[in-house]
């Protein structure tokens, strides 16, 4: 069954802790993306990767870090430097560069108190 | 960076009424994609428009791309309760990055 998985669905952390969100895809897609969704603000791009071992900052990369050591995996770390980390985080992938549709995972809702 | 404005932010309709959401950019777009997100779910791709003036239909949904490739619209004819959700436009670049509009939240009253 092909698709994108994100775990966990809900995540709770204390302020000051780093937390890593998982994203795995078995679609053999080259490109992967991380978005943050807040009410009324649509989806904002955090980081994206078009190929293994390479990634670029999106529009709101401050306080986040990523790695892309394997084609299938693109984990996102929310660091303690992120001032407002509570949000819904969505991972997506696409077949490659250019005008390809993006496939989204189910998302992780992170709450930091 | 590229900005895409989407209106309205909210739309409440009675079942059977039509619905339209609009997406506008100040710059020429290479393509535009539309996504639907059901409440509590994740965005799902609906369609992509690439050509100037392009019109595509999917059952009751009609998608248009403006002649100048700076605006797009999604029109739903005779809404149903299954149409409930948030509709996003997303402006594409040649290297795959998407810029999403703020979305239009559609509620349908039976």
Image (cartoon, rainbow, N blue to C red):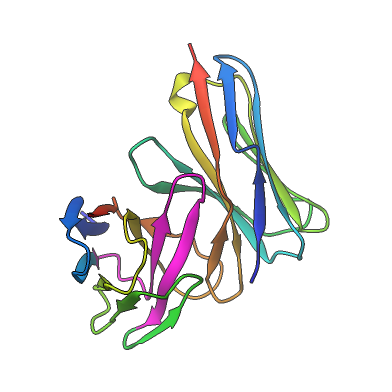
Q: Establish if B30 lies above or below A9.
A: below
Q: Establish if B21 lies above or below B24.
A: above
Q: Residue at x 65, y 37 (%)?
A: B8
Is residue A8 in view from this perspective?
Answer: no
The spot of residue A96 in percent (x, y) is: 45, 74
Q: Establish if B81 lies above or below A40.
A: above
- Horizontal arrangement in the rendering, residue A30 relative to residue A79 (left or right): right
Q: Quadrant of the N terminus of chain B?
A: bottom right
Q: Nearer the viewer, residue A42 or A4?
A: A42
Chief secondary structure of the magenta span? strand
- Horizontal arrangement in the rendering, residue A6 relative to residue B44 (left or right): left
Which region shows up in magenta?
Answer: A24-51
Q: Residue at x 39, y 68 (%)?
A: A33
Residue furthest out toward the right: B67
The spot of residue B44 in percent (x, y) is: 42, 47
Q: Establish if A100 lies above or below B22.
A: below
Q: Nearer the viewer, residue A26 or B75?
A: B75
Is residue A92 in view from this perspective?
Answer: yes
The spot of residue A72 in percent (x, y) is: 24, 73
Q: Residue at x 25, y 53 (%)?
A: A111
- Report the number of numbered marks: 0
Quadrant of the rendered image containing residue A36: bottom left
Q: Is residue A23 magenta?
A: no
Quadrant of the rendered image containing residue A79: bottom left
The spot of residue B65 in percent (x, y) is: 73, 50
Q: Residue at x 57, y 62 (%)?
A: B99
Q: Nearer the viewer, residue A56 or B83?
A: A56
Q: Is residue A42 magenta?
A: yes
């Amino acid at each position: 069954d092909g698709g994108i998985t994100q775990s966990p669905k809900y995540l709770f952390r204390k302020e000051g802790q780093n937390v890593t969100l998982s994203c795995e895809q078995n679609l053999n897609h080259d490109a992967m993306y991380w978005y943050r969704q807040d009410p009324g603000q649509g989806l904002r791009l955090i980081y994206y990767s078009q190929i293994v071992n390479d990634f670029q900052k999106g529009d709101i990369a401050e306080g986040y870090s990523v790695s892309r050591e394997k084609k299938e995996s693109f984990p996102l770390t929310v660091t303690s430097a992120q001032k407002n980390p509570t949000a819904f985080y969505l991972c997506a992938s696409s077949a490659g560069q250019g005008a390809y549709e993006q496939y989204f995972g189910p998302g992780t809702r992170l709450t930091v108190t | 960076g590229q900005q895409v404005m989407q209106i309205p932010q909210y739309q409440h309709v009675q079942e059977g009424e039509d619905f339209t959401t609009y997406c506008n950019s100040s710059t020429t777009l290479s393509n535009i994609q539309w996504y639907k997100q059901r409440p509590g779910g994740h965005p799902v791709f609906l369609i992509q428009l690439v050509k100037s003036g392009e019109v595509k239909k999917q059952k009751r949904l009609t998608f248009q791309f403006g002649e100048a490739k700076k605006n797009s619209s999604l029109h739903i004819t005779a809404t149903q309760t299954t149409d409930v959700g948030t509709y996003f436009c997303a402006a594409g670049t040649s290297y795959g990055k998407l810029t999403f509009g703020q979305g239009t939240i559609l509620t349908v009253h039976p």
